Image: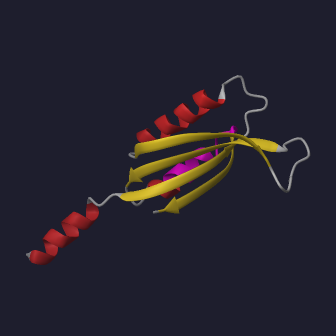
Amino acid sequence: MGLSIIVGKARNMQNKYKITLILQNNEQKESAEDVIDRIAGCMASLGGTVENKKNFGVREFERCVNRNFRSGTYAQYVVSAGKDFNAALCSRLRLDKTVNRVLVERI
């Protein structure tokens, strides 16, 4: 009986993630703040709770992969979510044209 209580608590456990994104909104009509808010809504729809979000502004890259894309808008989120959140978020953001890179760290 004691084991089932521990397993039950582990199922409801929330992980904390720090997610850093590089946004490519050169050709988009949305502002960077609108894109950051839209992605925060996407995270909430996947079951995450956005605790903090920051816009670090536009920064130039040290090494450019694409000559037409030399800088990007950096955004960072701190999210509490379940264990399947990481895979669901990456597959959802892969379809978004404004997101260039995604880094998910569990903290």
Q: Residue at x 75, y 44 (%)?
A: 59
Magenta range: 88-98
Residue at the left extreme, as displayed: 1
Residue 32: x and y in percent read 65, 31
Quadrant showing the N terminus: bottom left
In the rendered image, residue 52, in percent from the top left (x then y), is placed at: 45, 43
Name the residue located 85 percent from the left edge and 56 percent from the top edge: 63
Q: Residue at x 59, y 51 (%)?
A: 20
Which residue is nearer to you in this view: 20 or 60? 60
Q: In the rendered view of the protein, which quadrant contains the C terminus?
A: bottom left
* Image location (x, y in percent) of residue 3: 15, 77
The way the protein has been coloured in the rendering is: secondary structure
**27 in magenta:** no
Q: Residue at x 50, y 52 (%)?
A: 88
Residue 41, image x, y percentages: 47, 35
Q: Quadrant of residue 84?
A: bottom left
Of 74 and 40, nearer the camera is: 74
Is residue 96 on the magenta stretch? yes
